Amino acid sequence: MLAYTYIKQGKFELIEKPKPELRGSRDAIVRVTLGSICTSDLHIKHGGVPRAVPGITVGHEMVGIVEQTGRDVKLVKPGDRVTVNVETFCGECFFCRHGYVNNCADPNGGWALGCRIDGGQTEYVRVPYADQGLNLIPDSVSDEQALFVGDILATGFWAARISEITEEDTVLVIGAGSTGICTLLCVMLRKPQRIVVCEQSSERIRFVREHYPQVEVVTPEECKEFVLQSSPHGGADVVFEVAGGEDTFRLAWECARPNAVVILVALYDRPQILPLPDMYGKNLIFKTGGVDGCDCAEILRLIEMGKIDTTPLITHRFPLDQIETAYQIFENRQDGVIKVAVAMEAGM
Ligand SMILES: [Zn+2]
Ligand SMILES: [Zn+2]
């Protein structure tokens, strides 16, 4: 089968590999039908993920059909349509039992697929702990509707879940990339009084205005003054930092009112400064990133009910043999791309 593979720093290549086989009794083999490219794939390509193993198949955003299961897999069976979770977790350790699956104590836990073990930009993938890592896609939900459930949508859902939003709140979301939009969608489910999105790119601003007209949009330059002056308590009640830019951490806490919750979803390239003397008395609550992707069944239910729709994020579609072009467009942000969907089935 063809597998898009991390050869060495700076180089991914579509190469022929044998079909994966079951290794443990809790594994499943999934025939990948649709996958996507994530910014984290680019981080691997450019050497920003030291634990990524050269030779592995990349890709950790995918949906597919269960082909084969190990004897201890109970919740899925061959023929089931499933989403695949970006995180591998045992479901049994202290952290898993408390829902902190991102910190699963299993040596193979965490972000393994498409990083430390073969991922999903290919035709078949082996998923360890399949009962935890796979979720059934309802019949009425399409592959495209379910594509982001295991990664960026799980991230947005988790961020909204821990945010303590109430219906009186002004919520600020910094960053309207694909994870920012997923966060926005999950914030909207909680019906805060007002949502402000801060974004720099004119293309993304246009996207937010077109699809979510009920949301206010500001640029980073306008953001602080606008939020502080227009909020009843001198700042946002809840802030999501999903941009991870040069100054966006500072912007996040500066836009928060005293006693606000600030959720740091972004993955930063560099350390950030926490100027405690300037913050003294502001009594902020920071919650830091690293998705606990254990709500995928609930997210799929919400998609089925029509309450979450991430399909507008899919701006481009390619077959697996054109994945090189898909990467080029995604990496260079060409042609208004937000997310690409790659059909992994051979001959499609
Ligand atoms: Zn990802
Ligand atoms: Zn665990």
Image: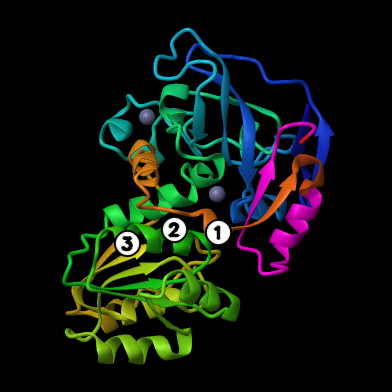
Amino acid at pointer 1: Leu
x then y, percent, for residue 66: 55, 22
Question: Are the residues flagged by discs 1 and 2 in contact, CB closer than 8 Å?
Answer: yes
**Does the magenta run of residues contain 90?**
no
Real-space Cα separation, disc 2 to disc 3, in angstroms: 9 Å
Judged from the image, the secondary structure of the residue bearing numbered disc 2 is helix
**Residue under numbered circle 2:** 182
Q: Write the residue at 51% across / 64% down.
A: 268
Q: Secondary structure at mark 1?
A: helix
What amino acid is labelled 2 in the image? Cys
Q: Is mark 3 within 8 Å of ligand 1?
A: no
The mark found on residue 313 in the picture is: 1
Task: Work out how far the residue at label 3 is from the one at label 1, CA to CA, in angstroms.
Answer: 17 Å
Q: Earlier in the sequence, mark 1 or mark 2?
A: 2
* Crowd around label 2: few <14 · some 14–19 · many ≥20 (10 Å): many
Which quarter of the rendering shows the N terminus?
Answer: top right
Q: Is residue 346 or residue 222 the one in the foreground? A: 346
Q: Are marks 2 and 3 in contact (CB under 8 Å)?
A: no
